[in-house]
Amino acid sequence: MKRLMDTLAGRMSAWMEVVAGSALIAVMLLIGADIIGRLFGHPVPGAYEIVSLAGGLVLGLALPATSMAKEHVSTDFMTARLSTTMRRLLHFGTRLIGIGIFALAGYGMLMMGVRLKEAGEVTAVLAFPFYYVVYALGGALIIQTLVLVAELFAGPKDERTTQP
């Protein structure tokens, strides 16, 4: 089960990281094109909308991969001083809380996507439906939940052995 969770969470988060990186590159190119277009009196219509939606995708879709790679802010200097038992309890407790929060947030985002789709909500200039982005973010939060479940099975790493 541990291996299955690791593989599933790893593949999904890696795929979403590629999508997030592609969205970031697209945003950079769009901003550059909009700046050049504005110099010649022809800005890109809807650039603000696209950058806003893509920015949300970049942040949301990169979250599981960042968590899996342990690239987020951490308080290792505090946990390294704890006993192994306390570290395991803290690891278990924080992962359980995170699983609950991200599962509920992901479910909430997916339900919001359903409501936005039913209401026909679209962006002002391009009339792009919001629910695509909301579904993607909800899915990213569900994958983040899987990453935390995989970390729960893996257990904490012994920080005292990795410090110089």
Image (cartoon, rainbow, N blue to C red):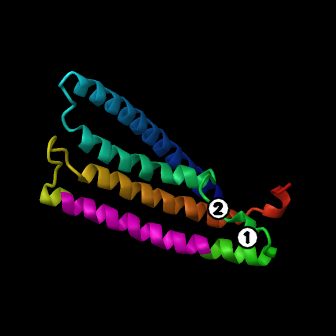
Q: Quadrant location of residue 106? A: bottom left
Q: Residue at x 24, y 44 (%)?
A: 49
Locate the N terminus by quadrant. Answer: bottom right
Instruction: Let me know if residue 15 appears in the view.
Output: yes
Give the residue type that dot 2 points to.
Answer: Ser
Q: Residue at x 65, y 65 (%)?
A: 153
Q: Secondary structure at mark 1?
A: helix
In the displayed structure, does residue 12 sit left or right of residue 28? right
Q: Which residue is mark 2?
A: 74
Instruction: Let me know if residue 8 appears in the view.
Output: no
Q: Is residue 29 above or below residue 112?
A: above
**Total marks in image:** 2
The magenta segment: 94-116
Q: Secondary structure at mark 2?
A: loop
Mark 1 closeness class: few <14, some 14–19, many ≥20 residues within 10 Å: few
Q: Quadrant location of residue 141? A: bottom left
Give the residue type that dot 1 points to.
Answer: Met
| 137 vs 30, nearest the viewer | 30
The question of residue 112 being in magenta is answered with yes
Q: Quadrant location of residue 39? A: top left
Q: Residue at x 85, y 59 (%)?
A: 161
Q: Quick check: marks 1 and 2 in contact, CB under 8 Å? A: no
Residue 35 screen position, x and y as percent: 29, 29
Q: Residue at x 23, y 52 (%)?
A: 130
Locate the C terminus by quadrant. Answer: bottom right
In the displayed structure, does residue 13 sit left or right of residue 38? right
Residue 56 screen position, x and y as percent: 36, 50
Q: Main secondary structure of the magenta part?
A: helix
Q: Which residue is mark 1?
A: 78
Q: Residue furthest front?
A: 39
